[in-house]
Amino acid sequence: MNHDPYYWGRPSNETYGSYNHKIANAGQYSHESNTSNFPKMNTQQPIVTGTSVVALKFKNGIIMAADHVGSYGSLLRFNNIERLIKVGKETVVGISGDISDLQYIQRLLDELEIEEEVYDNDGGDYLRAPNVHEYLSRVLYNRRSKMNPLWNAIIVGGFEKDRTPFLKYVDLLGVTYHSSTIATGFGAHMALPLLRNLIPEDKDFVKVNEEQISKAVEDSMRVLYYRDARSGEQYSVVIIKIDESTGELDFKFIKDAKVENQNWEFARDLRGYGSKQQ
């Protein structure tokens, strides 16, 4: 076996003859040569991932929450990953799925914000949530069409031009939809029913206030912490609303929220929990 660090594991040329560089059309490669000689490789599955994002509309704004965990398989490898991204003055983007693709999307959004808000703004319209969502839907559909998707599910929240709350979803296939209650990942199974108890139909979001949706999000994050093995105790919450008295925008970004009022009594009856084995 060749023990050179750059060729480690390859059979020894002295014993087996020279290596066949035509395997997989890789060509001859050394650490000094150009890596473009390698075959094209795309991500086949996400490696480090973030789980649920939950979001709701209410009568004068939106709320969105996501925890800080990055999971390497079943290992909760990272606990400091921020998955809510502020874009412009009044838009938030929540991303679940592959963390490296999240970082790529974050760079795209930073470039978009610099271009639109700094270099291409004459004092008129500025970057709003519908613009950001349309941009991301084109990016994800383009990558899907190249058979190299970004492995993410994204929620975009903010306001329309007429100041009505905006909440929309886009996934790795470029599929989009809007709703007053949206959740990604495991939250689509466990949290969404709780959110729809509060807002059973899209038009009902005008009947709920900030206090009610804040409690619904808090309950959802608690249930996800109980039931989703890839979720974490610490999470971030973004609340964007229009002050009804002054008409001014209020963007609140809470980065140190924690699952409160935990009760693990139900776990005593679970087989495999604690000292109770199968």
Image (cartoon, grey):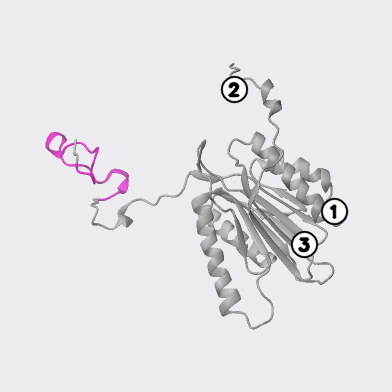
Q: Is residue 46 visible?
A: no
Q: Residue furthest left?
A: 14
- What residue is pinned by disc 2? 274
- Residue at 65% over, 71% down: 127
Is 193 on the left or on the right of 141, as rendered?
right
Q: Quadrant of residue 91?
A: bottom right
Element marked by disc 2: loop
Sequence-first disc among 2 and 3: 3
Which residue type carries mark 3? Pro
Q: Residue furthest front?
A: 261
Which residue type carries mark 2? Gly
Element marked by disc 1: loop
- What residue is pinned by disc 1? 208
Number of marks = 3
Image coordinates of residue 22 in percent, x first then y, are: 26, 46
Residue 22 disc label: none
Element marked by disc 3: strand
Image coordinates of residue 50 in percent, x first then y, are: 57, 46
Q: Which residues are magenta?
A: 4-27
User: Is the N terminus in the top left, top right, bottom left or bottom right quadrant?
Assistant: top left
Task: Characterize the magenta stretch by its predominant secondary structure.
Answer: loop
Residue in the foreground of this view, choosing between 118 and 30: 118
- Residue at 58% over, 57% down: 141
Sequence-first disc among 2 and 1: 1
Sequence-first disc among 3 and 1: 3
Disc 3 crowd rating (10 Å Cα; few below 14, some 14-19, many 20+) is many
Image coordinates of residue 201 in percent, x first then y, are: 84, 49
Check if residue 16 falls in the magenta segment: yes
Nearer to us: label 2 or label 3: 2
Residue 165 disc label: 3
